[in-house]
Image (tube, rainbow, N blue to C red):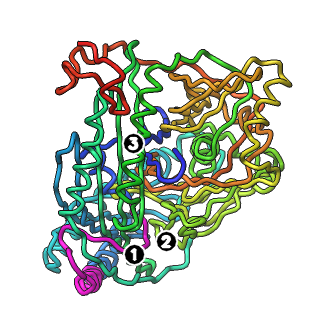
């Protein structure tokens, strides 16, 4: 995770890894992001709607909701006669119009629009105390499928009927298995119900007014931006991706919830890479997110970012490989945001406190000190922006129809709460509006806008000197300053070590004897949460915003993390694994007999054949 506009993708992998890394500029990744929930703010153009589309946006939700409610009523009444009978059914329909532009080397690789509609049918058989979603049977609670793109009520109703039938045939036998397993297994430590009661919600968001999207102008800008990488001989790949999307999510449930929430988003990802002589791949990514394409930075600002990325890559190629280290470290605001998301945030997600396969690091630490007393942590998905920066983790209702809520997780260092969905956990019986998922996966408690605040601050400009003072105090030759972060992941299962790994990109050695800071490469932050979180000495006085996409069991969801720069008395780093593949044998086309460097000055550096 990272400051300002950085992006996290990739879902959780095997064995409990919760992985969050910065997005690469490829069509495949852009397509994955398209299924993530989008920022519910502002307006945006789509391939299908070049000018004002308010009328079309106003009609579709009403037509679809009507079909969903009619079929839900029919299913609820009909299946009530079955044995076992469902006690809860919900339909969620997600519509998306997405437009992709992917450029490389001054040309377009992808220029495409995509429209899709998916339905999720959730069914709970049994009772709230024990149902088919209990424990490892949780996936039996949902069946998903594609819906017709037209608003033909008969066609849509037919597919919903088919998915409902398919889901009941999964849920009913799963519930019988759950009852059998519960009877023969040892008693569980957390005997909370499987589903919480919730007051039904009714909300239909205002239709989006879609402004014009100048496709031709953006095609030209993507070509120019991606083409700017061509003048740098040692930037071996450089791509620019733009994704613009409008979305509408509709939810109806047998409890009486009816919610329609339109949303819109624009995201740009610029990625460049090179390879050092020892084979280490080096990557720089910049990501920008806004409610609409017009809210993205100007072309001049983006061009400056391209040049900075290229310069960073040149410097990283020449930088020495860092050695394992344990000592004082300073994290920039962006790095601290990633750190808290990975090390703390995932462990505050409610379902991890109940699952006996989880490490449950903080489960029994409610009302105990878990952080230095000058730190507090909240998660507030109701915040649309902070100091002018739009927050990707904003939403009005979670994916279970519960209103979003501000949750005070840690107050003055003391643990107070967890982020819960409608899966109750011991001591926390109801949802606090953090049940989130990507289409096709069951919701779980997830982070939204995670905010870290501090009462022990110093001016941010003085934080470097504070690091030097700590280095001298401990008699170390240098400390580490982590300026930029590529991403990170964490282990939360008890069958594996309770560890985390954060992947820095720009790291400096800061020497105590006054020598200039030294850029290093190939280093990862590692450690265990209970130890690492107690070593924060002080923080800066300015909060920094990270926007991204995070993956876990319930898929990829947009998140934000906000934190000040942080000084740690001790932090451990290790060498990063890397391949030993050689850099390109031939120079790039056009550089065979010319001289070039990363600043594009053909008079300074010969390119060796």
The residue under the point 62% across, 31% down is 498
Residue 11 can be seen, yes or no: no
Q: Of 345 and 538, which appears nearest the observer?
A: 538
| Nearer to me, 291 or 15 | 291
Which range is magenta?
Answer: 37-66
How would you rate the neighbour count of disc 1 (Cα within 10 Å): few for under 14, some for 14-19, many for 20 or more?
many
Q: Please tell me which of labels 2 and 1 falls first in the chain.
A: 1
Q: Secondary structure at mark 3?
A: loop
Check the image and report above or below for 303 versus 594.
Answer: below
Residue at numbered disc 3: 10
Image-based side of 468 in relation to 495, left or right: right
Quarter of the image for residue 21 reads: top left
The residue lying toward the viewer, choosing from 280 and 343, is 280
Q: In which quadrant of the rendered view does residue 244 lie?
A: bottom left
- Element type at marker 2? loop
Q: Which residue, given by chain and number where applicable, does mark 1 sit on?
A: 261
Q: Quadrant of the C terminus?
A: top left
């Amino acid at each position: 995770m990272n400051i300002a506009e950085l992006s996290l993708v990739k879902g959780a992998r095997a064995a409990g890894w919760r992985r969050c890394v910065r997005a690469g500029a490829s069509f495949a990744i852009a397509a994955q992001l398209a299924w993530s929930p989008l920022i519910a703010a502002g307006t945006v153009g789509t391939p299908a709607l070049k000018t004002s589309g308010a009328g079309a946006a106003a009609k579709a939700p009403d037509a679809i909701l009507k079909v969903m409610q009619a079929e839900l009523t029919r299913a609820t009444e009909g299946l009530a006669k079955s044995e076992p009978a469902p006690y809860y059914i919900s339909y969620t329909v997600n519509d998306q119009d997405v437009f992709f532009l992917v450029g490389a080397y001054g040309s377009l690789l992808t220029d495409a629009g995509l429209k899709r509609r998916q339905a999720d049918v959730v069914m709970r058989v049994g009772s709230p105390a024990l149902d088919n979603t209990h424990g490892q049977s949780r996936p039996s609670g949902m069946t998903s499928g594609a819906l017709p793109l037209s608003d033909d009520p008969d066609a849509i109703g037919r597919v919903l009927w088919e998915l409902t039938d398919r889901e009941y045939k999964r849920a009913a036998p799963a519930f019988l298995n759950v009852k059998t397993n519960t009877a023969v297994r040892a008693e569980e430590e957390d005997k909370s119900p499987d589903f919480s009661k919730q007051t039904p919600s009714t909300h239909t968001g205002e239709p989006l007014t879609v402004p014009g999207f100048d496709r031709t102008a953006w095609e030209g800008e993507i070509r120019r931006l991606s083409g700017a990488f061509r003048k740098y001989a040692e930037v071996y790949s450089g791509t620019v991706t733009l994704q613009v999307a409008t979305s509408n999510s509709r939810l109806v449930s047998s409890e009486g919830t009816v919610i329609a929430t339109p949303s819109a988003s624009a995201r740009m990802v610029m990625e460049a890479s090179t390879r050092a002589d020892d084979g280490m791949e080096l990557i720089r990514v910049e990501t920008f997110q806004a409610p609409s394409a017009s809210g993205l930075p100007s072309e001049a600002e983006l061009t400056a970012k391209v040049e900075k990325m290229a310069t960073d890559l040149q410097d990283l190629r020449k930088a020495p490989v860092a050695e394992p280290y344990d000592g004082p470290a300073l994290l920039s605001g962006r790095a601290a945001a990633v750190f808290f998301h990975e090390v703390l945030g995932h462990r505050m997600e409610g379902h991890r406190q109940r699952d006996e396969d989880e490490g449950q690091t903080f489960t029994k630490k409610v009302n105990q000190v878990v952080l230095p007393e000058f730190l507090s942590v909240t998660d507030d998905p109701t915040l649309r922006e902070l100091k002018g920066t739009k927050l990707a983790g904003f939403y009005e209702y979670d994916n279970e129809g519960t209103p979003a809520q501000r949750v005070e997780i840690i107050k003055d260092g003391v643990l107070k709460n967890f982020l819960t969905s409608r899966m109750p956990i011991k001591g926390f019986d109801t949802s606090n509006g953090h049940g989130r998922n990507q289409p096709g996966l069951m919701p779980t408690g997830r982070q939204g806008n995670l905010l870290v605040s501090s009462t022990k601050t110093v001016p941010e400009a003085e934080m470097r000197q504070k690091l030097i003072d700590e280095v001298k105090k401990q008699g170390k030759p240098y400390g580490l300053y982590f300026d930029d972060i590529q991403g990170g992941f964490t282990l939360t299962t008890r069958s594996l070590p309770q560890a985390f790994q954060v992947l820095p990109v720009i790291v400096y050695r800061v020497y105590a004897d006054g020598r200039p800071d030294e850029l290093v490469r190939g280093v990862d932050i590692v450690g265990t949460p209970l130890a690492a979180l107690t070593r924060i000495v002080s923080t800066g006085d300015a909060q920094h915003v990270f926007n991204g996409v995070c993956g876990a069991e319930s898929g990829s969801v947009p998140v934000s993390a906000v934190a000040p720069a942080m000084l740690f008395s001790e932090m451990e780093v290790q060498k990063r694994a890397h391949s030993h593949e050689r850099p390109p044998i031939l120079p790039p086309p056009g550089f065979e007999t010319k001289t070039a460097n990363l600043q594009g000055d053909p008079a300074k550096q010969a390119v060796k054949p």
